[in-house]
Amino acid sequence: MGNLKLKGKDILKLGYPNNQSVNIALDVMKRNFATKNIHYVKSLLKEIHQNPENFEKDLTFGQIAEALLSSKKTEKRMLNTNRASFQIFGN
């Protein structure tokens, strides 16, 4: 087995969100690309981050792409501007 020195901080610097996708990316890269150069691995991760739709069906990178796509599906919701009616008892 190789000696790939990839850390979560390296993946976060590439622009990955701070969620489960970082752990999945670390696991996949250490399992499949342990003997490769770290610059090669970082370029692959950057490409996956930029276009996760292209890697969704890929056997090796599919897990990373799924985690990235699911994190992008979250959306912010606005609060209601109308207050709900309620009764006050007593003073």
Image: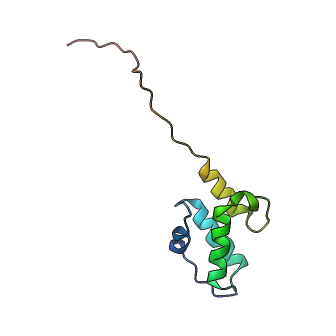
The relative height of residue 66 versus residue 22 in the rendered view (above or below) is above
Q: Residue at (62%, 47%) from the top-left corner?
A: 73
- Where residue 33 appears, as percent x and y from the top left, is 70, 80
- Where residue 81 appears, as percent x and y from the top left, is 41, 25
Q: Residue at (69%, 57%) from the top-left corner?
A: 66
Outermost residue toward the left in this view: 91
How is the structure coloured here? rainbow
The relative height of residue 23 versus residue 3 in the rendered view (above or below) is above
Q: Quadrant of residue 36?
A: bottom right
Q: Nearer the viewer, residue 42 or 29?
A: 42
Quadrant (top left, top right, bottom left, bottom right) of the C terminus? top left
Q: Nearer the viewer, residue 28 or 74?
A: 74
Q: Quadrant of residue 68?
A: bottom right
Quadrant (top left, top right, bottom left, bottom right) of the N terminus? bottom right
The relative height of residue 80 versus residue 5 in the rendered view (above or below) is above
Q: Nearer the viewer, residue 25 or 56?
A: 56
- Where residue 60 appears, as percent x and y from the top left, is 76, 69
What is the count of numbered marks? 0
Q: Residue at (67%, 68%) from the top-left corner?
A: 47
